[in-house]
Image (cartoon, rainbow, N blue to C red):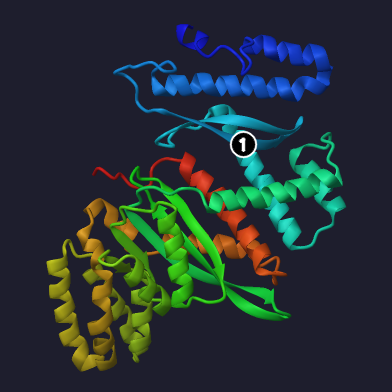
């Protein structure tokens, strides 16, 4: 209890329980939302102190991290929209348990709003859907819906431009969505970056909607990640996109590039003319990629090239120039290779984006496309952030 008394007051110095009582006494049930905000904020403060293993401003050998202010978090609850002050720590590894469920609910509401606005759903239908999500007793007006839409865009913009940190592994990919631009329908590229941070957590680093995968668009996207603080990159994994390849060399010169082994093996099948030989070739390539080290991989590659030069000359010529681009992963700890040798994780994320965007069929503009994709990725990012680590960075 000694620890609790250090933070046992409200913003104005009033004991927090008394402040909650005052709200109820002065406003009745109309003050329930404000009382709940006070109690949750205080519970979050207490939980942060327990996580830090130190009282506020206390110098302690047991302290595990440093407090880092607060982040406002608006949650649409059964008592209306409440803004909580979420306590932060420098490592970003703490999140108050009292708000976890609420924050996930908020992401679901944001995603529903984004999808409905993209599809042109009327305000009346939006209210009906939100009441089904949050509770039929909640009273939502069209003005509140418009305000929610504005807050949604502001929140997603803040998420897209949030500061980044040390991220050893970066995965890049793109997919296309049909968008109406300039009175015509065009295929816009959705550029996505996912990373594994120094703590071993997966994070969605960024997203952008561009007219194509040309180098200029990839370079601008990668530059925005660097400007936001992306650093410490030790490996970049992607498929072989010409624009991305040129932009990567310009923006991350010297960083090893891992070409997706899954796509390499798939592409190799196009150079095997005899169908009954494709399984044999696939097995040979898998054996090369599964070698214990790069020396053995090179040895098996040379043996395979010798065999293919006789039986599959086109495959041998292609493999000579391409297969070794899948060897960068041999420079990583063995525990990391399985996860980083392909972009399959990012491909699955793109499939989830496709599952949500195909309902829209055609986006009215690029901003609506960016809104929906950002809401999907923000939801996934929060799930990754609060889940267990993806890779042990100290194997």
Quarter of the image for the C terminus: give it. top left
Q: Is residue 129 visible?
A: no
Residue drawn at the location 69% of the way across and 55% of the way down: 114
Q: Nearer the viewer, residue 45 or 128?
A: 45
Percent of width and height locating residue 148: 74, 46
Measuring from the top left, give residue 24's x and y in whole percent.
78, 15
Q: Is residue 230 above or below residue 76?
A: below
Quickly name the residue at label 1.
Answer: 73
Compared to residue 44, the image places residue 380 above or below, namely below
Mark 1 nearby-residue class (10 Å; few <14, some 14–19, many ≥20):
some
Question: Is residue 258 depicted above or below 52 in this figure?
Answer: below
| Quarter occupied by residue 288 | bottom left
Q: Is residue 211 left or right of residue 361?
A: left
Residue 315 vertical placement versus 3 (above, below) = below
Q: Residue at x 28, y 86 (%)?
A: 318
Q: Position of residue 129 (x, y in %)?
A: 79, 48
Determine the residue positioned at 35% across, 45% down. 200
């Amino acid at each position: 209890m000694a620890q609790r008394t250090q933070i046992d007051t409200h913003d104005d110095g009033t004991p927090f329980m008394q402040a909650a009582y005052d709200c109820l006494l002065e406003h009745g049930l109309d003050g329930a939302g404000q009382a709940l905000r006070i109690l949750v904020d205080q519970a979050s403060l207490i939980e942060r102190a327990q996580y830090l293993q130190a009282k506020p401003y206390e110098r302690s050998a047991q302290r595990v991290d440093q407090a880092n202010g607060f982040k406002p978090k608006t949650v649409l609850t059964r008592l209306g929209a409440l803004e909580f002050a979420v306590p932060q720590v420098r490592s970003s590894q703490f999140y108050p348990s009292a708000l976890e469920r609420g924050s996930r609910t908020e992401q679901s509401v944001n995603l529903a709003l984004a999808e409905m606005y993209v599809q042109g759903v009327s305000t009346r239908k939006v209210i009906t859907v939100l009441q089904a999500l949050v509770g039929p007793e909640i009273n939502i007006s069209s003005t509140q819906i418009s305000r929610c839409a504005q807050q949604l865009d502001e929140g997603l913009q803040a998420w897209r431009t949030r500061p980044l940190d040390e991220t050893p592994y970066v995965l890049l990919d793109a997919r296309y969505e049909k968008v109406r631009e300039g009175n015509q329908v065009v295929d816009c590229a959705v550029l996505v970056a996912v990373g594994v941070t120094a703590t071993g957590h997966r994070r969605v680093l960024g997203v952008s909607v561009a007219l194509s995968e040309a180098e200029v668009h990839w370079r601008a996207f990668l530059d925005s990640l660097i400007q936001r603080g992306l650093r410490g990159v030790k490996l970049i994994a992607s498929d072989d996109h010409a624009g991305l390849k040129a932009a990567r060399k310009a923006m991350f010169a010297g960083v090893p590039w891992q070409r997706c082994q899954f796509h390499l093996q798939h592409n190799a099948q196009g150079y095997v003319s005899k169908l009954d030989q494709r399984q044999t070739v696939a097995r040979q390539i898998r054996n090369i990629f599964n070698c214990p080290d790069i020396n053995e991989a090179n040895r098996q590659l040379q043996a395979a090239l010798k065999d293919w030069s006789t039986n599959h000359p086109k495959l041998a010529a292609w493999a000579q120039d391409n297969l070794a681009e899948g060897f960068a992963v041999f420079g990583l700890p063995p525990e990391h290779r399985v996860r980083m040798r392909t972009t399959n994780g990012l491909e699955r994320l793109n499939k989830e984006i496709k599952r949500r965007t195909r309902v829209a069929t055609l986006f009215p503009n690029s901003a609506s496309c960016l809104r929906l994709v950002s809401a999907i990725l923000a939801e996934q990012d929060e799930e990754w952030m609060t889940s267990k680590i993806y890779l042990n960075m100290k194997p």
